[in-house]
Image: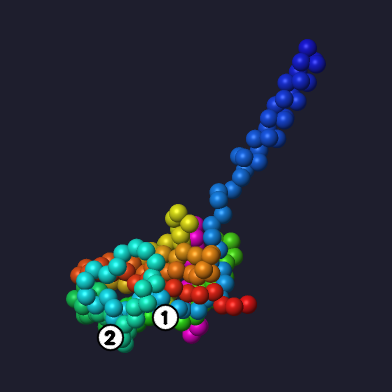
Amino acid sequence: MLHRLLVLALITAVTAAVARPYAQAPAASQPSLVGAWTLNKDLSDQPAERTGGEGREGGHAGQGRRGGGGRHGGGGFGSGGWGGGSSANGRTPEDVERMRSALRDEMQAAEHLTITQSGTTVIMTAGDGRTTRLSTDGKKIKDESTKIERKTTWEAGKLVSEINGLGQGKITETYSVDAERQQLHMALHIDAPQRKTTLNRVYDADRK
């Protein structure tokens, strides 16, 4: 009887040892955005290109199209097109100006990005020193200076960040990495009350 119990205990221990690596195996690792990146202007959309139509949905940039100077730095989304303009919606003039300034920053692609990550926190620093913090676990992060709130998650190997606090519309940034070409792709999806559009940006990895 004792021998039988020992055999059963041994079988149970071996089975648990074999199964444990599979039970504890983490989800497939997400691609890393970490690095220093420089905007490829030839492959990136300019805001002025999207002043008409619904814009281009999906796909990578890379058509070599370059627009002229953006109007007000916002490609037609400066005020009325984004639901701003006055205090009629309960916004103060300071709120309107804050939203316009934040939207201009959003529409104007950073010419250089440095991305670092610690745990679930991703920090993106633009060449002019502007810093954006993202929490990849879906935790909302609010920038008290701009009042912009971001909720970020990984979706099918892409980092998707939903932005709130810029009026009635919705803005989503989607980041993905092309490891073969050593490029960072960012798609800026804008769903405003009066229009929808997508701006694609491509960044090349800095040479080490």
Q: Position of residue 35 (x, y in %)?
A: 57, 72
Q: Is residue 183 visible?
A: yes
Between label 2 and label 1, give the one nearer the viewer.
1
Question: Does residue 205 sit above or below 140 in this rendering?
Answer: below
Q: Amino acid at mark 1?
A: Lys
- In the image, is residue 130 part of the stretch drawn in magenta? yes
114 and 169: which is toward the camera: 114
40 relative to 91 in the view: left or right: right
Name the disc covering residue 55, or none. Answer: none
| Magenta-drawn stretch, dominant element (helix, strand or loop) | loop
Q: Position of residue 203 (x, y in %)?
A: 47, 74
Residue at label 2? 71
The boundaries of the magenta stretch are 127-139
Residue at label 1? 41
Element type where label 2 sits in the image = helix
- In the image, is residue 177 part of the stretch drawn in magenta? no
Res 68 → quadrant: bottom left
Q: Position of residue 143 (x, y in %)?
A: 43, 72
Residue at the farthest front position = 63
Q: Amino acid at mark 2?
A: Arg
Q: Position of residue 195 (x, y in %)?
A: 22, 69
70 and 179: which is toward the camera: 179
Res 30 → quadrant: bottom right
